[in-house]
């Protein structure tokens, strides 16, 4: 298998301060990539390598959905979001650029112009603040 950044993060827990959810199967971390006005973007990731949704085992289905639901509620509450968008891409043609299954949980607001904004890399200190705010939700 080629190098997988999410497997490395799962194995080493590169920055524990960014981990906002974890159980035996799944972890969630504040994303490096955020959009202005939509801070709180979190990635929900299986610990075991799964390339895409087609390879997801029955064993991981329930824990993954539980994590997505839990993180979605925390994102909505922590950032007073009017809604939460969950995105997941499979294969290069659909925009998958990290070939380890993951879900994006993103706070949304009415008329936030999300689709027209560019992603940018949020500095580590700002991501730690987001993580701390989310951890207050449980």
Image (cartoon, helix red, strand yellow):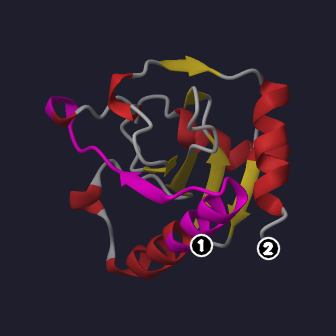
Point out residue 123 in the picture as x, y percentages from the top left corner: 75, 21
Residue beneath the point at 42% across and 22% down = 117
For this rendering, which residue is in front, 135 or 6? 135
Disc 2, SS: loop
Task: Work out whether residue 15 can be spotted.
Answer: no
Residue 28 sits inside the magenta stretch = no
Mark 2 or mark 1, which has the lower sequence index? 1
Residue beneath the point at 18% across and 36% down = 94
Asked which quadrant contains residue 18, the reply is top right
Point out residue 31 in the picture as x, y percentages from the top left corner: 60, 37
Q: Are marks 2 and 1 in contact (CB under 8 Å)?
A: yes
For this rendering, which residue is in front, 49 or 127? 127
Point out residue 79 in the picture as x, y percentages from the top left corner: 67, 53
Asked which quadrant contains residue 115, the reply is top left
In the picture, the quarter occupied by the C terminus is bottom right
For this rendering, which residue is in front, 46 or 81? 81
Q: Would you place residue 113 above or below residue 109 in this image?
A: above
Residue beneath the point at 56% across and 58% down = 47
Disc 1, SS: helix
Mark number for residue 70? 1
């Amino acid at each position: 298998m080629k190098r997988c950044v999410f497997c490395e993060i799962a194995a080493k827990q590169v920055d524990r301060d960014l981990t906002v959810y974890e159980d035996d199967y799944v972890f969630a971390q504040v994303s490096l990539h955020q959009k202005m006005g939509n801070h709180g973007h979190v990635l929900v990731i299986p610990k075991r390598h799964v390339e895409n949704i087609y390879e997801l085992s029955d064993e991981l289905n329930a824990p993954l959905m539980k994590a997505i639901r839990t993180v979605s509620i925390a994102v909505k509450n922590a950032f007073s979001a009017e809604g939460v968008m969950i995105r997941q891409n499979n294969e290069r043609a659909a925009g998958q650029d990290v070939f380890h299954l993951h879900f994006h949980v993103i706070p949304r607001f009415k008329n936030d112009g999300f689709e027209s904004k560019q992603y940018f890399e949020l500095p580590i200190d700002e991501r730690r603040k987001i993580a701390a705010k989310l951890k207050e939700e449980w």
